[in-house]
Amino acid sequence: MDLQTTIYLVVGASFALYLGIAFWARAGSVSEFYVAGGGVHPITNGMATAADWMSAASFISMAGLISNMGYGGSVFLMGWTGGYVLLAMLLAPYLRKFGKFTVPQFIGDRFYSKTASTVAVVCLLTASTTYIIGQMTGVGVAFSRFLNVDSSTGIYIGQAIVFFYAVFGGMKGITYTQVAQYIVLIFAYIIPAIFISLNLTGNFLPQLGLGSDLQGDSMPLLARLDQVVTDLGFKEYTTNSAGSMLNMFFYTVSLMIGTAGLPHVIVRFFTVPKVADARASAGWALVFIALLYTTAPAVGAMAKLNLHATVNTAVKSGGDLYAAESSLLNEQRPEWMKRWEKTGLLKWADQNGDGRIQYYSDSGLAEAKAALAKATKEGGDVAKAQAAVDAAQKKHDEAKAGKFAGAGWKGNELTVNPDIMVMANPEIANLPNWVIALVAAGGIAAALSTAAGLLMAISSAVSHDLIKNVFNPNISEKGELLAGKIAMAVAIVISGWLGLNPPGFAAGTVALAFGIAASSLFPAIMMGIFSKTMSDKGAIAGMLSGLFVTLFYVFAHKGLFFIKGTDFVGMVGGVNGWFGITPEAIGTLGAIVNFAVAYLVNKMTAPAPKHIQELVESIRVPKGAGAATGH
Amino acid sequence: MATASENNAKAYWSATLGLLAKILVIWFLVSYGAGILFADMLNGIKLGGYPLGFWFAQQGSIYVFIALIFYYAHAMGKLDRKFGVQED
């Protein structure tokens, strides 16, 4: 059976499974639609949380970014797992004891203010929508490869499926569907990793394989990889940091506290029967997440090595990387490269006209040349572009003691979008067709499950927290459900549209969403539990200022509301102008501002009234936790 | 004057905070400490083919996080019973 047919079959079968479960468990009442009746076992809940959590960003994009960033990619690994420790200890058990459905509900009640709850809804919508933009980018990658179309068409199709899927599901359908999705996606991730690890190192556990010697080589895999990439002009894999140490720090903090502040994850902990279960549930979720997260660095490093080995035969043989015949002839390139060229996410441009593929770090020469060609053709600033080419040429020719220039290389010729690395990984490693098909199914499962979870959070925020609690308390159950579904549809359209021109790679965009949650919701929830006296005004001022600082910096880099061409990076002192912090890491600063402003405002205003202080005391002890209620 | 039950709740809360502080110190040391601040230094030590700092950043910290959560859940369960505030 040919590859494409196998892919259709496997993906089709997985879909039939999810839709079957969703249909079987169709949500009835409002309460079931949101939290699955409050009776889900911690292990089941942990698995569903893991599926909810591990989105297109984790599954499709993260290992590719690690592959690109090397050690710097650790921010994702630590950030997106370490947050669970905070979630388990600082938030989950207390929110469970509080016993309501949603994060804005908690904030509204704890800070005795509809304004506070409305602000929380705004924060939630901003974070969730940004998150879904990242998902849509991932959905585009998954569907474009799956259907052999370009990535924009992939996004349109993905949008339609996500819509159908989330709008007709509801949480109960989603909880059990997500268990199924977790199983599909974890197998899809781990099986190719095992194959590849066995192939390269003879060790079947990727976690150990990454620390082993290469087969037929006396060198550890990581040492060989370091050597190959530095020879090709890239930074050393195991030490290449994500910006300064301060930036690494901020980036990791932002992802960690963002994890703990993301509403679609928190809401999972309302669905366990007891406070004690909420604590353990976070642990189980992390176990299931860690299966993928400890495999990802192996996938990233091994895919990088395999990719270099594919286009340069000297990588495996240990010969001369710069010899003319070491570079792969474009005509002999493997089938998988041709397939991915169709999506537009992998491109080859022959710079030196030798018909061979040179893939290396060229000091920006190829990009400068492309900019010059564009300026010449479209009448831009040719002199400036020429100067940039000359500067890059000089650096290029001096790099590696002139070895690139000596080999007749004239710029990097291969651009690989890191988001394709995981999906292409089994093809790069020549694995059997069914493994490739399984990865396609896994990628789609990951994208769908998280998009669905986020859309639920958006839907409940709009219908329940905004319309029912603020604007129209008399809305019927039916009206509430309908409003929620309309909110989902709007979110899908907006995020799909922005996903066509995404602010970054899937995982990078998702990191922005975490920054937004980190700077707005996390501090407010935390202060709501750990300070008895924090007042409504303190919390509102904190959330607004944290959100403002973060969005200002992010929009300065990525454009106002992520619309291309509306960036104003000059206003923040240039790219990464604040202490060299990247926009993905700024959420930490936002959170600090949030805490500080809340503290100051709280000092100047009346503290929380007595009945609120008693409420805080009561959520601190597990005794007397009933079922979660919406009223 | 505070009642006995209020005192008990206070003692429970301060025991909880004590436990949190202990766990957060370890949480910080394995990720921000070993994985970032001291990564360069630790990279001089090898764990198989892994430089140690790199291993903490991409593997070790995650294993420790899992252990921390289960330890926390277990220790909190003990605290709940000690102070008689567990669920029925």
Image (cartoon, rainbow, N blue to C red):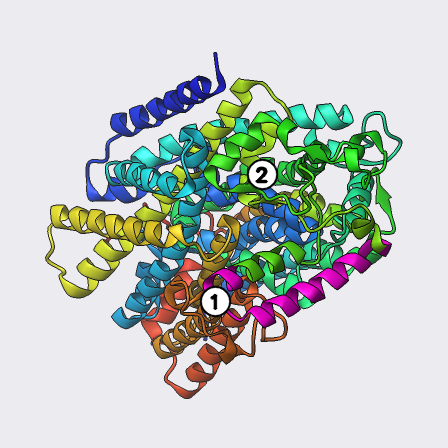
Kind of residue at disc 1: Gly
Query: Where A112 falls versus B20 (above or below)?
Result: below
Question: Looking at the image, which residue is at 56% across and 79% down?
Answer: A573
Q: Is residue A321 magenta?
A: no
Task: Give the camera-side residue of A563 and A89.
Answer: A563
Relative image position of residue A124 (x, y in whole percent): 36, 60
The magenta region covers: A374-401
Residues at marks 2 and 1 touching, judged by CB atoms closer than 8 Å: no
Picture quarter containing residue A158? top left
Q: Quadrant of the N terminus of chain B?
A: bottom left
Question: Looking at the image, which residue is at 40% across and 18% down?
Answer: A9
Tell me the chain of label 2.
A
Query: Where A272 falls versus A110 (above or below)?
Result: above
Picture quarter containing residue A174? top left
Picture quarter containing residue A263? bottom left
Helix, strand or loop at label 1? It is: loop
